[in-house]
Image (tube, grey):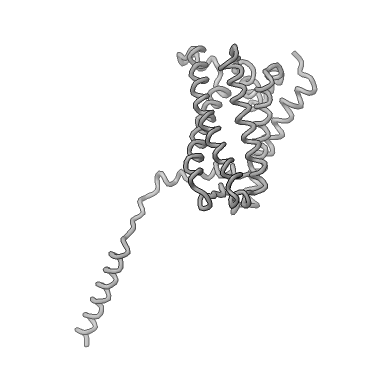
Amino acid sequence: MNASGTDLLLWVAFPYICLAVFAVGHVWRYRQDQFGWTSRTSQLLEHRWLRWGSPLFHLGAFMVIAGHVVGLAVPASWTEAAGISEHMYHTTAVWAGSVAGVAMVTGLGMLCARRLLSRRIRLGTDRSDKVLFPLLSATVLLGISATAAHNVFGGGYDYRETVSVWFRGVFTLQPQPEAISGAPLLFQLHALSACLLFAFWPFSRLVHVWSAPIGYLVRPYVVYRHRAAARATVVRGASAREARTRRAA
């Protein structure tokens, strides 16, 4: 089936433009704004909501990303060859994805609420955050809505036969816009919003993902000395010097 001009624009040109902005934008950001390459934490301004919201959001996000990698990048034939039946895969994906989605939405909701309700945080909100939070929320909610509407409460939809085929085609430089053009609207909107999110990624706080402090896991221990012990060492050293001075005199 030949793809229409609209399909080529939405499912070929637009994704590649977003990926190009994603790659070039990161290079530009690193060269021009290394001091701004941070999550810009506001923990000192408010920590009660952040204490729960941030772990929930990050844990849910990691689970959602892992689920997307398996669901989009791994063909169904591979999971079947590994002994995972289609029913087992979809059951696990729906329930694990639901738990991850609830955790991510709850955490994101708490982070957005503290930013709106706390005047000090609201006044310090960067312009990029005013775009990032709505865009990220829309992407997450569209994904959850698509899963709930079609695979939880609906009759079921095998996105690995359509959306996943299009996704892999984009990255293998063999785009198949016809694979996603017939997908349900919620899945299409979720894919488009995800493309926008990737395009905006380099210009937001999301760049801190690439600066995760993994080195802390393998760094050597830092030995700290108690202040009183250090003071006692200094006093003993001074006393020893005085004693040597008196003996020399």
Image coords of residue 196 (percent x, y):
68, 34
Q: Residue furthest bottom?
A: 249
Q: Is residue 70 above or below residue 137?
A: above
Q: Is residue 104 above or below residue 84?
A: below
Q: Is residue 248 left or right of residue 141?
A: left
Image coords of residue 130 (percent x, y):
66, 43
Query: Looking at the image, which residue is at 70% across and 16% down?
Result: 182
Number of dots carrying numbers: 0
Query: Looking at the image, which residue is at 46% across and 16% down?
Result: 82
Q: Residue furthest left?
A: 247
Q: Is residue 220 above or below residue 152?
A: below
Query: Looking at the image, which residue is at 29% across and 71% down?
Result: 234
Whether residue 23 is visible, yes or no, is no
Q: Is residue 5 left or right of residue 231?
A: right
Q: Residue furthest right?
A: 5
Image coords of residue 18 (percent x, y):
69, 35
Considering the image in quadrants, where does the N terminus appear? top right
Of residues 246 and 227, the one nearer the viewer is 227
Whether residue 162 is visible, yes or no, is yes
Considering the image in quadrants, where does the C terminus appear? bottom left
Image coords of residue 90 (percent x, y):
52, 16
Query: Looking at the image, which residue is at 54% across and 49% down?
Result: 41
Q: Is residue 7 left or right of residue 46?
A: right
Q: Is residue 210 left or right of residue 126?
A: left
Image quadrant where residue 184 sits? top right
Of residues 1 and 153, the one nearer the viewer is 153
